[in-house]
Image (tube, rainbow, N blue to C red):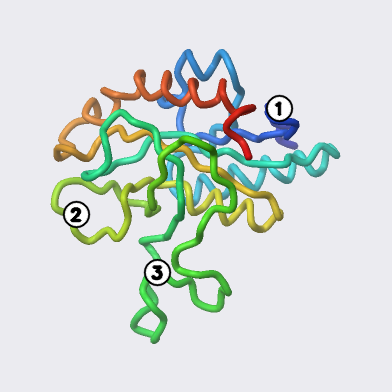
């Protein structure tokens, strides 16, 4: 069955495909503004969902100018409840070092371990992000060479690169100050982050370069 063609937003004279991992992060403030593709959680689902969406747009003759990846992230150093744009993203799951490759480098792929995103929104603070299929909490942050962690951004970026489409990542810090013990430790700030992310979306005409 052919997937439905995603709905694009339009800001600053650009068409934008919005991508999110879960309905839990897509609250009423964002629902009033955008209709994102919901990919599912983790690098595999994010790569599949983003690729399907970009393929559908191409097949329909309506390719997007830009992809905006929205959602939550963890951090034990950034302000909880605040939104940061992704300055650069790396893939913490990749480790082919026993074969002589640098940890984090994908073998035979001509891309750096840490990929900088090409577009910056004015006035929105930035942070380096690490993507992986595991949830980072407590002492595990000590092994992360980044300001924040998520489970999708690197996969979304690689899908975008394969289509030649630039990506902007926006992540609200939902957790990390304390060790995660329950599902509610992640969801407690999602309502607030929904409002914060929506506030940025409403100003995209001014924030996009």
| Number of the label disc, if any, that sits on residue 30 | none
CB-based contact (under 8 Å), mark 2 and mark 1: no
Q: Which mark is residue 104?
A: 3
**Up-down relation of residue 51 to residue 111 (above or below):** above
Q: Is residue 10 left or right of residue 176?
A: right
Left/right placement of residue 17 relative to residue 55 reads: left
Secondary structure category for the residue under label 2: helix
For image coordinates 71% across by 55% down, the residue present is 164
> In terms of sequence position, does the residue under pointer 2 or pointer 1 come before the other?
1
Viewer-side residue, 82 vs 123: 123
Q: Position of residue 158 (x, y in %)?
A: 57, 56
- Write down the residue under mark 2: 140
Where does the image place residue 147, in percent across and percent down from the top left? 31, 50
Looking at the rendered structure, the secondary structure element under dot 1 is strand
Residue 10 shows which numbered tag? 1
- Residue 190 image-quadrant placement: top left
- The tag earlier along the polypeptide, 1 or 3, is 1
Residue 87, given in percent of the width and then of the height, sits at 46, 50
Q: Residue at x 48, y 21 (%)?
A: 199
Query: Which residue is depicted at the point 41% across and 40% down?
Result: 125
Could you tell me which residue is drawn at 39 percent across and 85 percent down? 99
Quadrant in which residue 53 is drawn: top right
Mark 2 vs mark 1, CA separation in Å: 39 Å
For label 3, the crowd category at 10 Å Cα-Cα, with few meaning under 14, some 14 to 19 and many 20 or more, is some
């Amino acid at each position: 069955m052919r997937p439905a063609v995603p709905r694009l937003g339009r800001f600053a004279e650009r068409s934008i495909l919005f991508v999110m991992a879960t309905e839990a992060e897509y609250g009423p403030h964002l629902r009033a503004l955008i209709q994102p593709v919901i990919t599912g959680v983790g690098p595999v689902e994010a790569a599949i969902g983003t690729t399907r969406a970009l393929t559908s747009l191409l097949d329909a003759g309506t390719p997007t100018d830009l992809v905006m990846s929205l959602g939550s992230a963890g951090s034990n150093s950034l302000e909880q409840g605040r939104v940061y744009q992704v300055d650069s993203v790396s893939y913490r799951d990749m480790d082919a070092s026993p074969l002589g490759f640098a940890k984090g480098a994908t073998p035979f792929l001509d891309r750096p371990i840490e990929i900088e995103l090409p577009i910056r929104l004015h006035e929105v603070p930035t942070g380096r992000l690490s993507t992986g299929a595991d949830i980072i909490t407590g002492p595990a942050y000590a092994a992360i060479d980044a300001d924040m962690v998520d489970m999708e951004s690197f996969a979304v970026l690689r899908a975008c690169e394969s289509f030649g489409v630039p990506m902007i990542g926006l992540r609200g810090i939902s957790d990390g100050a304390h060790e995660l013990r329950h599902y509610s430790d992640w969801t407690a700030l999602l309502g607030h982050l929904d409002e914060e992310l929506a506030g940025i979306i409403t100003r995209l005409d001014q924030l996009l370069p």
